[in-house]
Image (spheres, grey):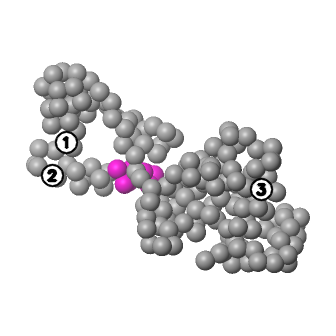
Amino acid sequence: MCFFHRLCSQVNLLVNTNDGQGGDRVHCPFCRNPDSRVIDSRTADDGTAIRRRRACPECGRRFTTQETVILMVAKRSGVTEPFSRDKIVRGVQRACQGRPVNEDKLAILAQQVEETIRARGLGEVPSHEVGLAILGPLRDLDEVAYLRFASVYRGFESLADFEDEIAALRQGHRDPGTTAAEPAS
């Protein structure tokens, strides 16, 4: 059983114990009845969400809900915020300015980053790990953009830092988790 389904089972156990009647309380969008019945459940969005078809026992109308697990990112300041693919794309776009990288490739990169982070099975990840997850796919996408991003993310302070990273790129077997310079604080 994957992480998402385990988590949903845990959530359902918590939700289903709310009033002894079983089932979660989803209001009908048509008549606002506080109860609905699940007719069908399916995974959606490559297994990151569950789509449920529901029926209202009061008015008889049907509607669809989608449940997703929110991945949280803990920033250095201590603040947590929901993971956002758009934020990944915006951050990497700056590094890709003037490079032959289109929006579709950036969207795929953001999806790869999210999949890498979700595969760890944690509900909250440090922002540092998000940055590390970006480095590998970005290096494969465009080495110049990778170098730009890495220089800011890792806080390069000298020409030697750039030279070390370029040498590692030329060797082609550098692990993105190892650093020539430590990340900026």
Q: Nearer the viewer, residue 89 or 25?
A: 89
Q: CA distance from mark 3 to mark 1?
A: 47 Å
Residue in the picture at 42% in, 42% down: 49
Residue 100 visible in the displayed image: yes
The x and y percentages for residue 132 are 64, 65
Residue at which label 1 appears: 25
Q: CA distance from mark 2 to mark 3?
A: 50 Å
Q: Secondary structure at mark 3?
A: helix
Q: Secondary structure at mark 1?
A: loop
The residue type indicated by label 1 comes to Arg
Residue at which label 2 appears: 18
Question: Would you identify the image quadrant in which residue 107 lies?
Answer: top right
The x and y percentages for residue 145 are 77, 56
Which label number is shown at residue 145? 3
Q: Which residues are magenta?
A: 1-8
The residue type indicated by label 2 comes to Asn
Earlier along the polypeptide chain: callout 3 or callout 1?
Answer: 1
Task: Give above or below for 115 relative to 182.
Answer: above
Question: Would you identify the image quadrant in which residue 173 lies?
Answer: bottom right
Q: Residues within 10 Å of mark 2 (few under 14, many from 20)?
A: few
> Label 2 near label 1: C-beta < 8 Å?
yes
Q: Residues within 10 Å of mark 1 (few under 14, many from 20)?
A: some
Q: Main secondary structure of the magenta part?
A: helix
The x and y percentages for residue 71 are 45, 56
The residue type indicated by label 3 comes to Ala
Q: CA distance from mark 1 to mark 2?
A: 9 Å
